[in-house]
Amino acid sequence: MPGHELDETDHHLLRLLQADGRRTFSEMAPEVGLSVAAVKRRVDRMRESGVITGFTVQVDHAKLGWGIEAFTELRYAGTTSVKEILASASRTPEVQAVFTIAGDLDALVHMRVRDINHLQEVIDRLRGSGKVIGTRTLMVLGSWTRDD
């Protein structure tokens, strides 16, 4: 797959796998009009080329008691390296992702917490690194994610 060029059948297979990563080759074959072996070859090729990077489980975090999602904008002291920013956030288990960004902010942290008190505790821990000079937190009310 030079340049990871995919045809419509490859895109269809990706959509099927994104909807259900446990779907078998034999289930997908009739949906895309190919043999089971051809589907397997295409999926293997997309895995080998890095187009498919893995298969995952989607979790309902609210059912696990982690129903509040928030983003916290972090501003760090001017001498703080990106490596230090990532290290401090990665030590916080509630942090789901860290985005280092250009502009007024240094990082945007995505987190999941149990309740508002827990959110405050996590923000206090992030501030406690000594290098954070400002924060602003945005609570998620709802979300939508593009599947493809």
Image (tube, grey):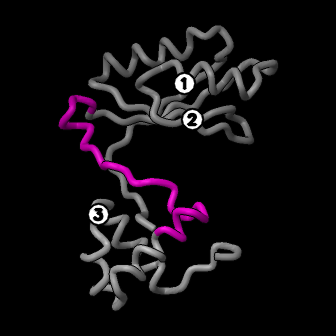
Q: Quadrant of residue 105?
A: top right
Q: Are marks 1 and 3 in contact (CB under 8 Å)?
A: no
Which amino acid type is shown beneath numbered disc 3? Asp
Which amino acid type is shown beneath numbered disc 2? Val
Q: Earlier in the sequence, mark 1 or mark 3?
A: 3
Q: SS at mark 2?
A: strand
The quarter of the image holding the N terminus is: bottom right
Q: Residue at x 64, y 17 (%)?
A: 132
The quarter of the image holding the C terminus is: bottom left
Most frequent secondary structure within the magenta stretch: loop
Q: Given the current orientation, which residue lies at the most extreme right position?
A: 79
Q: Nearer the viewer, mark 2 or mark 3?
A: 3
Residue bearing mark 3: 20
The correct choice, above or below, for 127 with respect to 71 in the image is: above
Query: Is residue 124 left or right of 26 when viewed as pictured?
Result: right
The correct choice, above or below, for 18 with respect to 114 in the image is: below
Q: Earlier in the sequence, mark 2 or mark 1?
A: 1
Q: SS at mark 1?
A: helix
The correct choice, above or below, for 85 with respect to 60 in the image is: above
Between marks 2 and 3, how big is the CA–CA gap? Answer: 27 Å
Find residue 98 and name its label: 2
Q: What residue range appears in magenta?
A: 44-66
Q: Are marks 2 and 1 in contact (CB under 8 Å)?
A: yes
Which amino acid type is shown beneath numbered disc 1? Ser
Q: Residue at x 28, y 44 (%)?
A: 59
Q: Residue at x 51, y 31 (%)?
A: 72
Residue bearing mark 1: 90
Crowd rating for badge 3 (residues with CA inside 10 Å; few <14, some 14–19, many 20+): some
Q: Nearer the viewer, mark 1 or mark 3?
A: 3
